[in-house]
Amino acid sequence: MNATKVQAYAAQSPTSGLAPFGISRREASTQDVEIEILFCGICHSDLHSVRNEWSEFMPTNYPIVPGHEIVGRVTKVGSAVTKFKRGDLAAVGCMVDSDGTCPHCRDGLEQFCPNMILTFNSPDKHLGGVTYGGYSDSIVVDERFVLRVPSNLKLAGAAPLLCAGITTFSPMRHWGVSKSKRVGVVGLGGLGHMGVKFARAFRAHVAVFTHSPNKKEDALRLGADEVVVSSNADEMKKHAGSFDFILDTVSANHDINAYINLLGVDGNLTLVGAPAEPLAVPAFSLIVRRRSFSGSSIGGIAETQEMLDFCGENNITADVEVIPIQKVNEAYERLLKSDVKYRFSIDMASLKSE
Ligand code: NAP
Ligand code: ZN
């Protein structure tokens, strides 16, 4: 198969940091779309993967080129492509392929397909080796996994919708977040701040739980009705048993039971944050009020398009700090300190100066 060399940023080991690295992209075949990448968001999953923190569940293959919040412009389409033409805006999220035939794919839940291919660190059936993500000049993806970007959205802030957006939108839709529901969002980072925006757009009552007291004002500006600093035991106690739904987006180990106790009867806590260590859930916290504790993984392709269209109609994007790729290692350190307002978005034009 024909391939072209493009520039990227890769990590060579869990401790090497990211640096310039040449990769190959396949020539666009019949059903492929080739995209020049304009912006790529930095997800905490990029950091977990680069540092091999999920080694037990999803070991990292090095070199790794992360990035799964991709927006760009179509530069080439294969002869069978119908949804895109050269010059269109286009986006790619966490997945680039699935078998298309299993029950999950037929239900529009490609994220659960046993043969799903992630945008990075999955086997690359075209070129061999592993897939390389969005910290690069361009990407070639099967049209089925390419999304349309509403033209009114600013691109730097639209990129994070492809992971932070869908990962918070999908469980809120699944668990019926709507008017008059009491919703909690734990952790005000990339995912958390999108969760607040969606819960607000769905007209729920939204409370943010943060371990960073300095984020209080931002949380209110982003749409929260109230903010609780999680270290304040009195404030936490006041909210006991009062929520219908809580979305936990925390990237590090923490006391999950403190939040399960905030749920009312039949309340649900959905975990989207993915700390490497197991979390302890006491049986009685769930039993006493028929509470449920569940997880959620990104969202299917149709739902991702629905989310993007919803964002277009409601003018929703991520609050971003735009950085050149040369600042990516610094950005990772800041992510670990919860020091980002509220998503880093890499201006990929900066890669051309390497
Ligand atoms: P992020 O921007 O770093 O946000 C994580 C937030 O968690 C921080 O802003 C902070 O919020 C809170 N936090 C961090 N360390 C903490 C600690 N030690 N104790 C308590 N709170 C802490 O990360 P993100 O990109 O939103 O991703 C969040 C998590 O979701 C990651 O684990 C990521 O891998 C995972 N994820 C999962 C999916 C999925 O499909 N399920 C998709 C994408 C990402 P405060 O400062 O407000 O406390
Ligand atoms: Zn992500």
Image: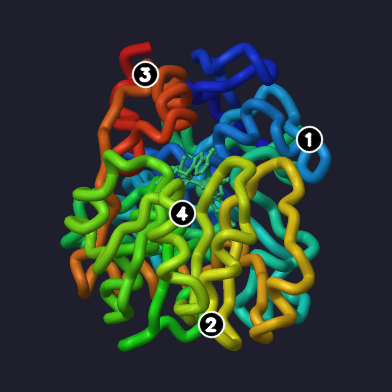
**Quadrant placement of the N terminus:** top right
Q: Residue at x 60, y 32 (%)?
A: 3
Instruction: Give the label on residue 55, or none.
Output: 1
Q: How far apart are marks 1 and 4 (CA)?
A: 35 Å
134 or 17, which is in the foreground?
17
Instruction: Give the label on residue 39, or none.
Output: none
Are dots 3 and 4 in contact, CB under 8 Å? no
Q: How far apart are marks 3 and 4 (CA)?
A: 38 Å
Q: Which of marks 3 and 1 is in front?
A: 1
177 or 23, which is in the foreground?
177
Q: Where is residue 226 in the image (x, y as percent from the top left)?
A: 27, 64
SS state under label 4:
helix
Q: How far apart are marks 2 and 4 (CA)?
A: 18 Å
**Quadrant placement of the C terminus:** top left
First in sequence: mark 2 vs mark 1: 1
Q: Position of residue 331 (x, y in %)?
A: 40, 25
Residue at label 3? 327
Instruction: Give the label on residue 233, or none.
Output: 4
Is residue 225 toward the left or the right of residue 15 in the image? left
Q: Residue at x 39, y 39 (%)?
A: 40
Q: Can residue 183 be seen in this view?
A: yes
- In the image, the residue with mark 4 has its CB under 8 Å from the nearest atom of ligand 1: no
Q: Residues within 10 Å of mark 3 (few under 14, many from 20)?
A: few
Instruction: Give the label on residue 264, or none.
Output: 2
Q: How far apart are marks 2 and 3 (CA)?
A: 44 Å
Is residue 290 toward the left or the right of residue 204 in the image? right
- The amino acid on which the numbered mark 2 sits, given as a three-letter code, is Gly
SS state under label 1:
loop
Q: Residues within 10 Å of mark 1 (few under 14, many from 20)?
A: few
